[in-house]
Amino acid sequence: GEPVARLGGATVCTTDPMRDVNAGLDLKAGTHHLDGRRSLQYVRARHIPPSGDLGRVRRQQQFLAELLDDFTDRGVLRDPATLARTAGTLLSTLRADEELTTQRLVALGRALRDLDGERTAFATVPISDFDHSVPGWGSTLVWDKERAHRLFEAVREDRPITDAEAYALPAPGTPVAWAPSDVPVRVQAGPEARHEAARIVQELRGSGFDARGRTSTAAGEAAPEVTEISFAPSERRRASALAAALPDAVLRPVRGHGRVLEVRVGRSGSRVVPVVHDRSSVEGAPATGAALDCDD
């Protein structure tokens, strides 16, 4: 937090409120200019959507893109005196190795003087196992060797790294961040749509969803025009995985809803598309600074 404070703080933005008790973060929806302490809370937070390591990394990437934009707007990288002070501030608390001197950091800044945050690109090394247990260390992450090799090869050859398909799993299907086998689904339809419901159940099971069917006989209960997915707000990540498999459906968060997601088949029916569990491709997909910009 101290280096950011010395640099004048940082700007972040969010479309939804952010509250992480563990990190001490509490932000309303909108754009915020954070001081050093609140910046540290922001980059440490991992219990807000998207949660976990990849969600935190994505917010850190956005933080860096906005910080670089701020440097560009203030002319930090073009003014030798300001650049030298900035480099000194960074090196007062950060250290990569003994060879990273103020002079080298200034030279790097000069080389990047025409770069702004929108022209940067960010990527996360693809992960094959998010909970690999190592004796003495506990839970660790394991790189996906093949996809990581493709990423670093692109960096070495100075090729764009934002081609998400280059780092996706070879298996056919839309990538989802939650394992379908851990998504319980109840497909509900009236008697007139029971065959459509049975088809949806069968095709969801084909992608691994824990799907069951139920025929509604309640009097006066009309089917919605568009297929709906009802879920508890705490189950949004599971609901997002199901929505990827039902692209024509609409999401409907319902307070007090149980853990089982409910699909109400609409009068227009619903396509079912194959999905594949690939958290890296969803939460850690390469992104440009422009895509992460607060103005977008």
Image: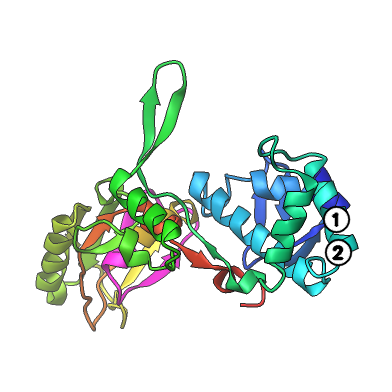
The image quarter containing residue 212 is bottom left
The residue to which callout 1 is attached is: 84
Q: Badges 1 and 2: C-beta atoms under 8 Å apart?
A: yes
Few, some or many C-alpha atoms within 10 Å of disc 2 (few <14, some 14-19, many ≥20)?
some
Residue 278 sits above or below residue 16 on the image:
above
Q: Which residue is found at the position 51% from the left and 44% from the top?
A: 53
For the residues labelled 1 and 2, the Cα–Cα distance comes to 6 Å
The residue labelled by disc 2 is: 80
On the image, the x and y values in percent for residue 136 come to 45, 16
Q: Is residue 122 left or right of residue 145?
A: right
Q: Quadrant of residue 261?
A: bottom left
Identity of the residue drawn at 78% across and 50% down: 103
Q: Nearer the viewer, residue 238 or 150?
A: 150
Quarter of the N terminus within the rendering: top right
Three-letter code for the amino acid on which mark 1 is drawn? Ala
- Using a 10 Å C-alpha cutoff, classify the residue at mark 1 as few (fewer than 14 neighbours), some (14 to 19) or many (20 or more): some
Along the line of sight, the residue nearer the viewer: 197 or 38: 38
- Tell which residue pokes out farthest to the top in this image: 136
* Occupied quadrant, residue 193: bottom left
Residue 175: x %, y % from top left = 31, 60
x, y percent for residue 36 = 82, 49
Q: Please state which amino acid type lies under the numbered disc 2.
A: Pro
Quadrant occupied by the C terminus: bottom right
In the image, 77: left or right of 142?
Answer: right
Name which residue lies at 21% across and 75% down: 271
Of residues 107 and 289, which is closer to you in this image? 107
Q: Which residues are magenta?
A: 242-263
